[in-house]
Amino acid sequence: MQAKGLLFDLDGTLVNSLSAVERCWLKFAKRHHLNHDYVLTSIHGRKAIDNIKLFLPDKPNEEIKQEFNWMEQLESQDLDGIGEIPGASKFLQLLSSQNIPWGIVTSGTKIVAESRFNLLGVAKPPVFITGEMVANTKPAPDGYLQGAKALGLLAEQCIVFEDSTAGIQSAFNAKCQVIGVNLLNCAQANVALNINSFDELIIKKVMPTDIVISKINAE
């Protein structure tokens, strides 16, 4: 796969935050007497505010805002069990050392995203798109279009790393290439590559502004 820049989702892509995310949303479900399975199958790849509006459709805006603030505080503080996807921090450090443009595009809020990203021990990139910066949540293309523009690139010139169905569709809607992370069914997701660890990847510069990414076992 050839590109000029890389964009990364955060949760499930660079950090394994699934247990913390689900733990927080189960507390929300219990708080509002919602079906746990319904909540857990609906939350991934979407902004928290959009999830809350989905789960509490009849609540006034003021109550929605209060619940959002409650959830944001809970998620930013609950870091128990969160760790990096294998090889993620080393891969990001390699990109920076080779001056390869990269950035983050996440549906999480700034407070929550930064608390989780900081666990990687990697310098925060200049391009760090969070949920409140984007008008339409994934699977809309807004986040990845905004991320590519911030890198000074066309979306078609970027490879996106994603783990969720909504995120993958968002990247495809933006006309980006996609590498899946820990996908159960990569054929169904129609991604070019699927990885379980960033250590599986080889990255090479083929021109001053172009890179090629492949899997080690595909060499």
Image: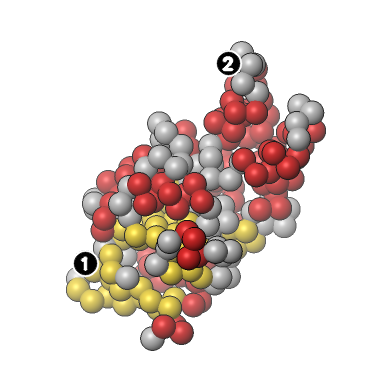
Left or right: residue 24 versus residue 104 is right
**Which residue is located at x 63 percent, y 16 percent?**
58
Residue 14: x %, y % from top left: 53, 60
The part of the image, by quadrant, that contains residue 182 is: bottom right
Residue 62: x %, y % from top left: 61, 15
Mark 1 or mark 2, which is nearer the start of the sequence? 2
Q: Secondary structure at mark 2?
A: helix
Along the line of sight, the residue nearer the viewer: 89 or 63: 63
Q: From what the image shows, is residue 163 above or below residue 129?
A: below
Left or right: residue 130 versus residue 31 is left
Residue bearing mark 1: 209
* The N terminus sits in image quarter: bottom left
* The C terminus sits in image quarter: bottom left
Q: Secondary structure at mark 1?
A: loop
Residue 85: x %, y % from top left: 58, 65
Q: Please state which of the two labelled residues, at mark 2 or mark 1, is closer to the viewer.
A: 2
Mark identifier at residue 61 = 2
Badge 2 crowding class, 10 Å Cα cut-off, few under 14, some 14 to 19, many 20 or more, is few
**Which residue is located at x 43 percent, y 61 percent?**
190
Mark identifier at residue 154 = none
Q: Is residue 93 visible?
A: no
- Residue type of the residue flagged with mark 1: Thr
**Which residue is located at x 30 percent, y 52 percent?**
175
The part of the image, by quadrant, that contains residue 202 is: bottom left
Q: How is the image coloured?
A: secondary structure
Badge 1 crowding class, 10 Å Cα cut-off, few under 14, some 14 to 19, many 20 or more, is few
Left or right: residue 138 versus residue 157 is right
- Residue type of the residue flagged with mark 2: Asn
Label 2 to label 1: alpha-carbon separation:
46 Å
Q: From what the image shows, is residue 91 above or below residue 165?
A: below
